[in-house]
Image (cartoon, helix red, strand yellow):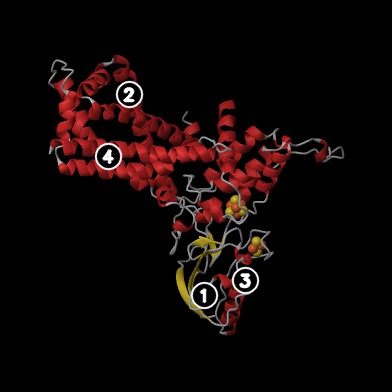
Amino acid sequence: MKLTLKIWRQESANAKGKMVDYQIDGVEGDMSFLEMLDVLNEDLVAKGEEPVEFDHDCREGICGSCSLQINGEPHGPDKLITTCQLHMRSFNDGDTIYIEPFRAKAFPVIKDLIVDRTSFDRIQHAGGYVSVNTSGNTIDANSIPVNKHDADDSFNAATCIGCGACVAACKNASAMLFTSAKVSQYALLPQGQVEATERVQAMVRQMDEEGFGNCSNTGACEIECPKGISLENIARMNREYMAATSKG
Amino acid sequence: MGGLIQSSTARKFAMAISGLFLILFLAQHLTINLTSVISADLFNELSHFMGTNFLVQALLQPVLIFGVVFHFVMGFILEIRNRNARDVGYVKFKGSANSSWMSRNMIYSGLVILAFLALHFYDFWVPELVHKYVQSHPEDPTRYYAETVAKFESPIRTLLYVISFIFLMLHLLHGFASSFQSIGFNNKYSKGLQGFTKAYAVIVPLGFIFIAIFHYINSL
Ligand code: SF4
Ligand code: FES
């Protein structure tokens, strides 16, 4: 299949970027979206041009590295997948595809389609952990019984791969789905109770400091999240936060 | 309170609480207005009570004004912050793929409601204040019905009211259900509650529209 690609090119963080048009031929339906970009880049390199920079690592939907706003949607038109799992059979011969970086003030562009998502790391560092004594007398986690329902919800929240599609999809560039998933995975477990009060406050504070927007419950994040992280997590974080704040 | 309202989560909570309060007020306002369709005397009686009762005037009215102002000011603050959170916009953004039009355009439906409130205050509140406090007329408990009905003789005003209530409907269709999510209420009852909020969002504005059109047709 033959495609027209409109790709955001930006030389460096401070350079001015613009959309550039590329024609590509010989794209197979079985190629992943990233493989299609590999083909484009081989062409560009052969012509002596700069290849298009984009993030990727595992290419099997588990690391959260690949990003891309494709035709106005994070990870493209299909649901519950990452860009590396998106196949070209989702497009038609002759299509024009817009490829842009995830956009948020807290995700500044590094180059072309690569954005800096370390703001997520800093939110995680602010409280996304449990303190465990690892000096030799660590207690086996399984010795504390956990309600099955809570364990499942916690596990589901923990499947968040930190890709940032929730921020990219949100009209407010809010990081509440990510942050709430990271809060919930601990808030639901007995092991997470010790630091519960400080955790939610610290993570929300960091999220705000990074310059993410305010959630207005459009629900776009939940629809675009490749891992199906539920809005229930945001409601839980709101409860946790108000409870923590009333405790001081 | 100052520190609380500085966080995004607390702002969201406050936005929801003020919204829910205003939604409750709408039901009360509609109930009283509906009596204007049934009986002029009953409408006069209730309006007189609302306009002269000490508790309503000294307590409920200031709380209502605070609620309205707070909801608007906070709405604008959130909108500005949210726009700043994406300094470089997308060339192509397909919001319709993952969210409702209502949810993405609360600021616009809100602005229409604000414009409506300006008209509504000009129509009813300002004359009321002038009547009571500037001209210091003695209280006449029978004046309300005639004053209200007279406003809807104008087809333009009636149309403006109808349009505003359609935007109120759009605002509520997202806002009512959204406030429950914001205060952390998302559980097995949410689906049922959502049905109720959607019905409320449609029925209450329709009620106001019915009253406006009723009085307009009556005046012909
Ligand atoms: S919540 Fe979903 S969309 Fe957001 S970072 Fe986690 S996996 Fe990605
Ligand atoms: S490259 Fe790892 S999730 Fe796509």
Using the numbered discs, state the Cα–Cα distance from disc 3 to disc 2 in whole angstroms: 60 Å
Any mark on residue B62, and which? 2
Tell me, yes or no, whether the two marked residues, 1 and 2, touch with CB atoms within 8 Å: no
Q: Nearer the viewer, mark 4 or mark 3?
A: 4
Q: To which chain does the residue with label 3 belong? A: A
Structural crowding at the residue carrying mark 4, measured as other residues with C-alpha within 10 Å and reported as few (<14), some (14–19) or many (≥20): some
The reply to the same-chain question for discs 4 and 2 is yes
Structural crowding at the residue carrying mark 3, measured as other residues with C-alpha within 10 Å and reported as few (<14), some (14–19) or many (≥20): many
Q: For numbered disc 4, what is the local secondary structure?
A: helix
Using the numbered discs, state the Cα–Cα distance from disc 4 to disc 1 in whole angstroms: 47 Å
The reply to the same-chain question for discs 1 and 3 is yes
Cβ at disc 4 under 8 Å from ligand 1: no
Structural crowding at the residue carrying mark 2, measured as other residues with C-alpha within 10 Å and reported as few (<14), some (14–19) or many (≥20): few
Position of the N terminus of chain A by quadrant: bottom right
Using the numbered discs, state the Cα–Cα distance from disc 4 to disc 2 in whole angstroms: 27 Å
The one of A157 and B79 positioned closer to us in this rendering: A157
Tell me, yes or no, whether the two marked residues, 4 and 2, touch with CB atoms within 8 Å: no
**Image location (x, y in percent) of residue B99:** 47, 52
At label 1, which amino acid type do we have? Asn
At label 3, which amino acid type do we have? Ser
Marks counted in the figure total 4
Q: Is residue A56 visible?
A: yes
Pointer 4 residue: B209
Using the numbered discs, state the Cα–Cα distance from disc 1 to disc 2 in whole angstroms: 60 Å
Any mark on residue A32, and which? 3
